Amino acid sequence: MLVSTFSDNFAKGSMELEIGALVSELVLGHGYMHYGYFPKGLTEELSLQALGQAQHAYFEKLLETIGTVPGEIRRILDVGSGAGANAKGLIGAGFDVTCVSPSTQMNEMARANLPNGTRVIDSSFEDLATNARYDLRLFAESFHYMELKSALTQVEKYADIGVVIFDYFHRDAANSDARDGKRSTHAAFLEAVARQERFEVLVDKDVTAAITPTFMILENLKSEKLAPFVRRFRAILKQRHPLRAKVFEAVFGRSMDKLGPKPEKLASMDKRVCRSERFAQSHEYRLIAMCRKPATT
């Protein structure tokens, strides 16, 4: 997700996600946790505001893609719903949305952000057990966390009409997590869908180039804004409070090195380009829509 790019492993697990949601809510005002979508490429303004606009463009693309699925879509299950920003937008567009996520902390944030009565389920999608029916399953940067076979089994069980996936896949099977089947390749996904014989792929677009500007903006903000601040903070602390500085460095030094690399390291490589290129070389970001095939007799 978006925050893992910005923090560069400064925080881990659910705390990392909560920090990302909080930054998005306080700074950008919407609480999105996914990457930005830049259909026209990188903007001239490398700012959080530009990223916020691109994140909303991502949501608008989701909404547009839901409209390509034939049938009357009313009930949506938002899988890996984060702080509820996408669900809130979908509810505003007239959909009946249920959220499911294994993160109880994130779910509490979603409950606070969503209209009263919105159902938020504390569960992983693989372990979901409910008698409720849903027209469409939505995965916005959540599908890659799941074991492929289990996820598709649940999709078949609960997707009455269709599925929309806006997420990334590994380009090389050697880099996917073969131990648990997660983070599969796009080809493996299509093969699994074909074997299942329950869904027809309607939309399948490689939108990697429209996603990677996210990394360039975040790395620019990190190197131009955050890193100088971290270096100044460490220098002032060392000058004014040397003993406290030693304790601080012992506890947080490695994390601070990631946020504020040394000047010579910044001069030797353009991180904005490297991070973007590395992602594009190892992943492909896909926008996928599927509909259920008619039942055969």
Image (spheres, rainbow, N blue to C red):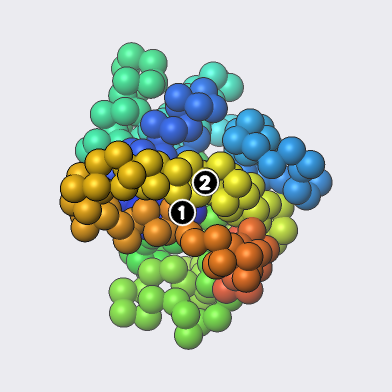
Residue sitting at x 45%, y 27%: 25
Please name whichever residue, 150 or 48, is drawn nearer the observer in this view of the structure.
Answer: 48
Image point 39% across, 31% down: which residue?
Answer: 22
Q: Residues within 10 Å of mark 2 (few under 14, many from 20)?
A: some
> Which residue matches tag 1?
260
Q: Residue furthest front?
A: 239
Q: In the rendered structure, find residue 172 and report the number of the disc placed on it.
A: none
Q: Amino acid at mark 2?
A: Pro
Q: Do we see residue 160 in this rendering?
A: no
Disc 1 from disc 2: Cα separation: 7 Å
Q: Is residue 123 left or right of residue 55?
A: left
- Residue labelled with disc 2: 228
The answer to the question of whether label 1 and label 2 lie on touching residues, with beta carbons closer than 8 A, is yes
Q: Residues within 10 Å of mark 1 (few under 14, many from 20)?
A: many
Q: Is residue 277 left or right of residue 236?
A: right
- The structure residue drawn at horizontal position 69% and vertical position 41%, both measured from the top left corner, is 46
Residue 295: horizontal and vertical position, in percent?
51, 55
Residue 184 visible to an observer of this rendering: yes
Question: For this view, does 176 lie left or right of residue 70?
Answer: left
Task: Give percent across and percent down for residue 208.
Answer: 67, 60
